[in-house]
Every structure is written in structure tokens, then in C-alpha cells.
Amino acid sequence: MDKLIYLTQHLRIKIYNMQITANNPNRKSWIEVPKNSDFPIQNIPFGVFITKDDIITIGSRIGNQVIDLGALQQLGYFKDLKLAEDVFLQDTLNDFISHGRKRWRRVRNRIADLFDSQNITLQNKPELLEKILFHIDDIEMLLPVNIGDYTDFYSSIEHATNVGKMFRDPDKALLPNWKHIPVGYHGRSSSIVVSGTKIRRPKGQILPKGAQEPIFAPTRLLDFELETAFITTDGYRLGESIPIEEAEEHIFGMVLMNDWSARDIQKWEYVPLGPFLGKNFATTISPWIVTLDALEPFRVASPEQNPMPLHYLQKSKNHSFDIHLQVGIKPNNSIETIVSNTNFKYMYWTMNQQLAHHTVNGCNVRSGDLFGSGTISGPTEDSYGSMLELSWGGTKTIKLKDGEERKFIENKDTVIIRGHCKNEHIRIGFGECSGKVIKAN
Ligand code: MN
């Protein structure tokens, strides 16, 4: 056997054998975790935050307490884990992500141990905890990674079918390539923002109904797209591919994502090269990256694929996750209405297939790259992942709790995406991915 292949396989086996002790459902933290919190001690997500003293650092979270991992590292609590000395004293997670899955797992296990109620290392040591713990209300979350490249897929069969029915032929809603290729496009990373960032209504070229010539105006059809996204570590060199069975070794974790879209701008510009200014004005992600390790207890099968895709896309294991997702709209100074409830498990193409396909031509991926799932729609009318589908192209209105109606998103509306996994023992969640729309310039 080729020596390199032997070594990689050997390494993989070692990684799989390292237990994810952080996931033990019986663990309890000495940090109080409110009921229904997305962040029990079994989650241990990673993010970047800034303190009131303007110090930027890498953190994790249990309940409503944010843990300064830079401080923990300086105090020596990761000393034996073979990390770069300053890996948590940075303003992005890219270097830590480059460390690879084995070290992500070790660090999660160590954090779980330090904050376990059985462990007295840090418990009841106020002078120490003052340096390590911050209440979530006392800090501000920042973008967790420096995103070099961003790709967005189109992998929900329900979404692709709905859009195909509305814009093309109801009888041939899916294009001939759809069941053979995880369709995607290269997006823009410069306009990806963290949850809480205000979103300015974009302006652009719009072709009014019946008109021959476009006008220039603020979008009238501003929409959200309910998505998740995964963040990779470094893949192989340019020219090499990530095989499907290895894809998860290169995926650090997931976030929630709102791929804001201006449907009228999109409709006029998208032929023949696809999404452009109707998409790249803003994309919002949630601040906490939930690792695939933390999602492990919620692994499920993805939908059966027929026809069978080509060999490099064939899956051997369960590669999806049971993640409940919802979208709320909150008009200015009013109450929120949940307009959609769906689940990640409906996705036809898995993250592993997306990554295998993305690299099959030799395209390389790097630490911190972001890959959007595509709009996640479920099978029922109340599980669609965009206003385009919920209002069926603007032919229906959605009633909000305060009596208002919507077909698309109005100025001063806040759109909030939430997601969590739940079993009889634990709930692992993502927190919120929210953005408030402000009027065009
Ligand atoms: Mn999208």
C-alpha cells in the first residue's frame, strides 16, 4: 500500500478512537445553564468576542457565560495539548482551525473537564474567574473567522422544486443536472457579517413588469434565505481532491446563515452567469461555530437519492444532522412572528457531497472558507425557507401576529434565524442569526 495512504488511514483511525468525552450527556457544569439554553456544557462552540475594554479574544460559551480561551491558555490550562502558543490570542479562529480535528477534539474535551461540576480547578476561585468568564451581555460577538472564500449551494430539493415551478415549468421544475450535481456558485466573502449587523436595503437594476428597459431603484423584493453553512480547515494542495469519506475531517463546524436576496435585482441579472448583485450586498452568519463533534449525537440519514449519483458522490454512512430550524420576523417596536419551521435533515445533498464535489476538479479549500447549504425548505407550506416561497412569488400574504402583512421584508423588520438539536438528554443549539433592515441610501 502507498505509504502516504497508509499513514492517513492510520491517523484517521487514531482520531476516531479518541473519545469525545465532552459530549457525555451526564455531564453538568458548575456554570448555571438556563433551561432550554442552546449552550449546555456538551456544546462548547467556538467564537470571537470583544470585551468592554476593547480586547478581542477567542471564546467558548456555557449558558450565558462566555469563556476567554486566550486567558485560559495564558494561565497554562492547554499547555499539554500541543497548540501554537498564541492560537487563542488572535482575532480569528483560522489558525486554531488549521490545527485539525484531533486538536479541536482535545480542546473541547479539556474545556468540558475544566467546567464540569466534579472539577474544582476553577470553581469558586473568583480572582481567577474574573479573568476568564464574561457575561454574554457584557461582550460583543465578532465574525469568528477570516473568510477567504465563500460558496453557496442549492441543495434542498423542495426549494429547487418550488423555485423551478414559479419561474420555469411546473412539470419540469428541476433542471436535468440537479439530481447529479450539488449545484452551487461562488459568492462574495467581503460582505459576510455577524449576527446583529444592520442590513441596508440594496439598490440596483430592476425590470418592472411589462417594461422593456430596466430602472434603477431600491429593491422592492427583499428576501431572506434560511441556510446553514459549514466552515472548513485546509484541504489538500491545488490539484488534489477531498474524497467523500474524508470530507468530515476537513469540516470544523456549522453556523446559521441568512443569505439575504433581492429577488427583482436577481431576476434581471441572473441569466446566463447566475447570482451577482442580488446576493452579494450582505450575508449574515451566527457568531458561534458549533463543531461537527458536538452535533454527533444528532446524526441522521439524508434523503435517499435516485438516480444514484456518480461514484465520487456516493455516500456510505449517515451524513446529515437533525437540526430544527426556524425563521421569525419582528417589525419595528413590535412582536415577533415565526413564519417558518423546517429541518436540516431534508437537504438532498449533504455537506460531505458538497465538499467532495467542490474539490473533485482539484479546487483547493482553506481554513475559514464558508460553504452555504442553500435555502432549506421543508415539504410543507409552513416549512419554506424564503419569503419568495412563503408568499409564492408575492401572490400570497403572510399574516403577522401584530396584524401586519408581509410578502417580502420591509424596512425596520428584523429577521431572526434559530436552530437547535434535541434528544431526550440534551439540546445543542446555535443561538441566533439576526439582522435588521434599514432603508436604502
Ligand atoms: Mn442562498
Image: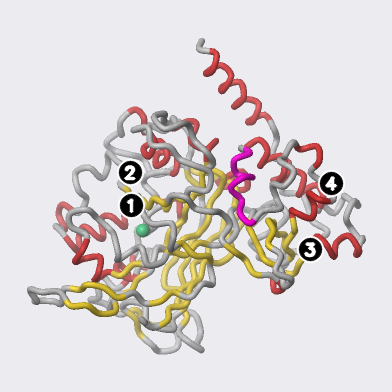
Judging by the rendered image, the residue that carries numbered circle 4 is: 76
**What is the C-alpha distance between the residues marked 3 and 1?**
40 Å
Amino acid marked by disc 1? Tyr
Q: Quadrant of the C terminus?
A: bottom left
Amino acid marked by disc 4? Gly
Amino acid marked by disc 3? Leu
Earlier in the chain: of badge 2 and badge 3, it is: 3
Earlier in the chain: of badge 1 and badge 2, it is: 1
**Highlighted range, magenta:** 91-99
**What is the C-alpha distance between the residues marked 3 and 4?**
16 Å
Residue 55 % position (x, y)? 71, 65
- Camera-near label (3 vs 4) is 4
Judging by the rendered image, the residue that carries numbered circle 1 is: 154
Vertical position of residue 313 compared to residue 377: above or below:
above
The residue lying at 77 percent from left, 50 percent from top is: 27
Label 4: few (<14), some or many (≥20) within 10 Å?
few
Judging from the image, the colouring scheme is secondary structure
Q: Give the number of the disc on residue 434.
A: none
Earlier in the chain: of badge 3 and badge 4, it is: 4
Judging by the rendered image, the residue that carries numbered circle 3 is: 133
**What is the C-alpha distance between the residues marked 2 and 3?**
42 Å
- Camera-near label (2 vs 3) is 3
Secondary-structure class at tag 2: loop
**Image check: 226 left or right of 248?**
left
Q: Is residue 59 visible?
A: yes
Judging by the rendered image, the residue that carries numbered circle 2 is: 182
Vertical position of residue 83 compared to residue 382: above or below:
above
